[in-house]
Image: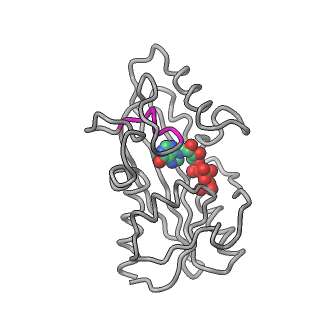
């Protein structure tokens, strides 16, 4: 089992909560806030893989400690994978989740194919070497928002096999079946064998 501490290189407090719920006490995870780092992490690539590595590498170099980051995108089939890597900035650089959801619902108006998936890529850097993990949650985009838990696009995403949106689930329900949860599970398995 990996014994040290890992920094989770993210500025998103919701991601920290979800990941903390999954790793429990098995790994000591430090957030950027624990390190008094509050700046936004730059993402200049056009792939989740590129951005995840960019964030992890930046923090690894800045603090000199092993760390991981993740980049997540919502890939909608009828929109050729949009908003994908641009999920956070879909409606514009200064817009938030409400505007992003409005834009997505507008673009899907009248479309019968509402299939979508969340994809998370985790980039883990241990002693300078990158290890990558991926998690996917398949589902579809609802006609309108449902629920108020979670964050981001959760109110309009319903995972296959459930009749609740992610925003109608508790953290404990969402975490293990989500894109992030599946990627984190692989991360934990890897760290167990480390
Ligand atoms: P960091 O880069 O600091 O980790 P971020 O919020 O910028 O945090 P991303 O670059 O991964 O995160 O952006 C992905 C966007 O997709 C994010 O802003 C959310 O709106 C959305 N998103 C990510 N995970 C999600 C989830 O589990 N449920 C709903 N929406 C999610």
Instruction: Depth check: give the residue in front, 118 or 168.
Output: 168
Identify the coloring: one colour
Magenta segment boundaries in residue numbering: 152-158
Left or right of residue 172, residue 123 in this image? right
Residue at 70%, 75% in the rendered image? 61
Instruction: Depth check: give the residue in front, 33 or 27.
Output: 33
- Residue 169: x and y in percent read 36, 44
Residue located farthest toward the left when viewing the structure as drawn: 161
Left or right of residue 124, residue 183 in this image? left
Residue located farthest toward the top when viewing the structure as drawn: 110
> Above or below — where is 17 with respect to 125?
above
- Residue 181: x and y in percent read 39, 57
Left or right of residue 186, residue 86 in this image? right
Residue at 59%, 32% in the rendered image? 98
Considering the image in quadrants, where does the N terminus appear?
bottom left
- Residue 173: x and y in percent read 33, 51
Q: From where the camera sits, is residue 50 visible?
A: no
Tally the numbered discs.
0
Considering the image in quadrants, where does the C terminus appear?
bottom left
* Image quadrant assignment for residue 62: bottom right
* Image quadrant assignment for residue 69: bottom right
Confirm whether the magenta stretch covers residue 2: no
Instruction: Depth check: give the residue in front, 94 or 56.
Output: 94
- Residue 123: x and y in percent read 53, 64
Residue at 40%, 41% in the rendered image? 166
Residue at 67%, 80% in the rendered image? 64
Q: From where the camera sits, is residue 46 visible?
A: yes
> Above or below — where is 178 with respect to 75?
below
């Amino acid at each position: 089992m990996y014994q040290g501490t890992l920094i989770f290189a993210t500025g998103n407090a919701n991601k920290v909560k979800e990941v903390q719920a999954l790793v429990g006490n098995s790994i000591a995870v430090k957030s950027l806030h624990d390190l008094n780092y509050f700046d936004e992490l730059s993402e200049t690539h056009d792939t989740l893989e590129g951005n995840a590595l960019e964030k992890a590498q930046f923090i690894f170099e800045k603090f000199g400690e092993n760390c991981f980051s993740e980049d997540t995108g919502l890939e909608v089939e009828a929109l050729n994978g949009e908003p994908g890597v641009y999920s956070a900035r879909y409606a514009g650089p200064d817009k938030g989740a409400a505007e992003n959801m409005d834009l997505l619902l507008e673009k899907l108006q009248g479309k019968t194919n509402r299939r979508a998936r969340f994809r998370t890529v985790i980039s883990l850097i241990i002693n300078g070497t990158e290890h990558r993990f991926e998690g996917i949650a398949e589902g579809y985009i609802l006609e309108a928002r449902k629920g108020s838990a979670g964050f981001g696009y959760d109110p309009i995403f319903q995972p296959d096999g459930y009749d609740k949106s992610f925003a109608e689930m508790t953290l404990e329900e969402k975490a293990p079946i989500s894109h992030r949860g599946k990627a984190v599970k692989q991360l934990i398995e890897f760290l167990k064998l480390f």
